[in-house]
């Protein structure tokens, strides 16, 4: 996925339980913590916080792990 993701975009990604859909909550450009995990993002290598539409849980993923839905 390119860095053309924006807050509110609908996306899908793979999990151990199968494919999940949700929305982009924010672009992360610094070290951040979500659900007990640490994401080491930077302005040169941003990551994206997403919220699952099925469970409501949040996670942070690299842009290449997300696809627009």
Image (spheres, grey):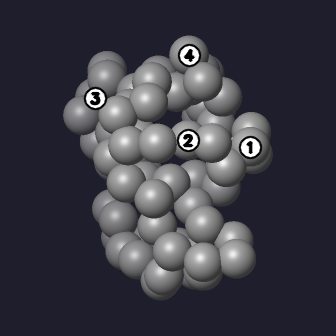
Front-most of residues 30 and 17: 30
Q: Secondary structure at mark 2?
A: loop
For label 3, the residue is 55
46 lies left or right of 60: right
SS of the residue at dot 4? loop
Quadrant location, the C terminus: top right
Question: Is residue 20 visible in this depiction of the protein?
Answer: no
Coordinates of residue 14 in the picture (x, y in percent): 64, 31
Which callout, 3 or 2, points to the residue nearer the camera? 2
CB contact under 8 Å: marks 1 and 2: yes
The residue to which callout 4 is attached is: 69
**Which residue is at a point 66% across and 28% down the rendered structure image?**
67
Give whichever of discs 1 and 3 has the lower sequence position: 1
Residue placed under numbered mark 1 in the picture:
2
Q: Secondary structure at mark 3?
A: loop
State how far apart marks 3 and 2 are (Cα): 21 Å
Q: Nearer the viewer, residue 12 or 26?
A: 26
Asked if the residue under mark 3 is in contact with the one under mark 1, i.e. CB atoms within 8 Å, the reply is no
Mark-to-mark CA distance, 4 and 2: 11 Å
On screen, 41 above or below 60? below
Q: Which residue is mark 2?
A: 5
Quarter of the rendering containing residue 18:
top right
**Mark 4 touches mark 2? (CB < 8 Å):** no
């Amino acid at each position: 996925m390119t860095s053309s993701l924006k807050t509110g975009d609908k996306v899908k990604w793979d999990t151990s339980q199968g494919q999940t859909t949700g929305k982009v909550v924010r672009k992360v450009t610094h070290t951040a913590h979500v659900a007990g995990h640490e994401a080491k993002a930077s302005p040169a290598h941003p990551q994206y916080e997403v919220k699952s539409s099925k469970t409501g849980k949040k996670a942070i993923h690299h842009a290449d792990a997300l696809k627009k839905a």
